[in-house]
Amino acid sequence: MKILVTAFEPFNGEAMNPALEVVKRLPDQILGHELVWRVLPTAFGGARAELESVLGELEPDLVLCLGQAGGRKGLTLERVAINVMDAPIPDNAGEQPIDDPVRAEGPAAYFSTLPLKALLAGMQERGQEIRLSNTAGTFVCNQVLYEVLHWASQHRPALRAGFLHLPYLPEQVENKPGVASLSLEQMLEGVLVLLELLVEHEGQDMKVAAGTTH
């Protein structure tokens, strides 16, 4: 099995992005399965082009996209990507789409194809704090999750793919009083445990793996 993990460049004036710092420290294998990581531009057009290229090149079996959600308190798995680009700030290419679709021909939304409830339970059993989020926003993170799932619907229906948001690093909040952060060591440990769980649950039905049909 080939696992692809993606991250983003720093954006919005930040000197770093926790997703980028995490992927640079990932191993080449997870439980004997190949792991490849790529950095995407924090730009709507650039992210789409790079993502299409890497998906076509690697044809991964599992995709986990990582991104920064400054202000959140911990790791959050995203449930859904919506078909809209509504940027609160310009991307790194200076583009700021407002109420534009990610894909004009695409459905209103795609749901993550990861076993979310099983992952939440597994992470908690292993002492990792994680939450489920019902919005990936309307910036490039949401777009990338939508693009991956759209590509899978057309080319690899069996592909498992999802998105994990990471909070700020402590260095990023030194001048942001009261804003939550998490150490790089904690984020890296959480991502590694999550990847191990994804490998362990590969091939299982999402609801059955979670032990519930709710």
Image (cartoon, grey):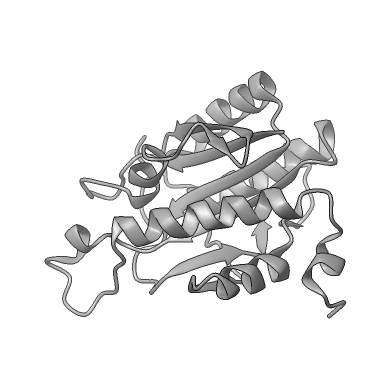
Left or right placement of residue 74 versus residue 47 in this view: left
Residue projecting furthest to the top:
57
- The residue depicted at 64 percent of the width and 45 percent of the height is 102
Image label count = 0
The reply, left or right, for residue 106 in relation to residue 78 is right
Apparent side of residue 51 relative to residue 56 in the rendered image (left or right): left
Please identify the quarter of the rendering in which residue 99 is found.
bottom right
Q: Quarter of the image holding residue 106?
A: top right
Name the foreground residue: 19 vs 92: 19
In the rendered image, is residue 84 in sight? no
Q: Position of residue 152 (x, y in %)?
A: 77, 38
Q: Is residue 130 above or below residue 94?
A: below
Question: What residue is rendered at 54% in x and 70% in y?
Answer: 126
Q: Is residue 8 visible?
A: yes
Q: Residue at point 44% right, 40% down? A: 26
- Write the residue at 45% across / 42% down: 7
**Looking at the picture, how far across and down is residue 9, in whole percent?**
35, 39
190 or 15: nearer the eye? 190
Indicate whether 113 appears above or below 51: below
Please give left or right for residue 105 compared with residue 86 in the image: right
Picture quarter with the C terminus: bottom right
* Above or below: residue 1 compared with residue 8: above
Q: Which residue ends up furthest to the left in the rendered image?
A: 175
Residue 100 spot, x, y in % from top left: 59, 49
Classify the position of the N terminus by image quarter: top right
Q: Nearer the viewer, residue 69 or 73?
A: 73
Residue 95 sits in quarter: top left
Q: Residue 187 at x, y = what percent?
A: 39, 58
